[in-house]
Image: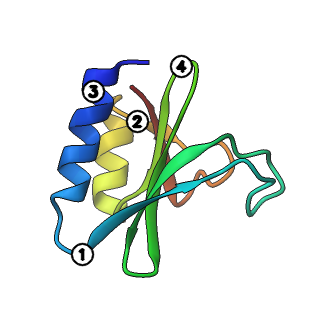
Amino acid sequence: MNDELLASIEREVLGWPGVSKEAGGGDPGQAGFWVPPATVYRFGRRRLGHVHHGDGGLADFSFPREVRDELIRSGRAIPHPAFPESRTSASY
């Protein structure tokens, strides 16, 4: 896990007005897949994404379609394995 990059992600996301974080994961998740412990970022009640803890480090976030497509096209993210049409995943 790259602690410096993780800290950078957290500073950026928590710098957005109205965004908060909470502990999450450690449960079966929405699609029945096991979700490892993670830090969840929210805007009000809306979940923006989360960063998994542990080996390898993975950040899963939702973006507007145009941004999502550019992140995937540029190789900076991949489609989320469980939600490929709406979310992205990226290693950190």
| Three-letter code, disc 3 | Leu
CA distance separating discs 4 and 2:
15 Å
Write the residue at 71% across / 46% down.
35
Q: How is the image coloured?
A: rainbow
For the residue carrying disc 1, how many other residues have a C-alpha within 10 Å: few (<14), some (14-19), or many (20+)? Answer: few
Closer to the camera in the image, 52 or 87 = 52
Comes first in the chain, label 4 or label 1: 1
Q: Do the residues labelled 2 and 3 touch (CB within 8 Å)?
A: no
Placement of the C terminus among the 4 image quadrants:
top left
Is label 2 in a helix, a strand or a loop? Answer: loop
Mark 4, residue position? 56
Tell me: 87 left or right of 84. left
Write the residue at 32% across / 32% down.
6
Camera sees residue 66: yes
Placement of the N terminus among the 4 image quadrants:
top left
Comes first in the chain, label 3 or label 1: 3
Is label 4 in a helix, a strand or a loop? Answer: loop
CA distance separating discs 3 and 1:
22 Å
Comes first in the chain, label 3 or label 4: 3
Is label 1 in a helix, a strand or a loop? Answer: loop
Mark 3, residue position? 5
Comes first in the chain, label 2 or label 3: 3
Mark 2, residue position? 77
Q: Residue 18 carries which label?
A: 1
Write the residue at 39% across / 39% down.
72
CA distance separating discs 1 and 2:
25 Å
Residue 17 lies, in percent from the top left, at: 17, 72
CA distance separating discs 3 and 4:
12 Å
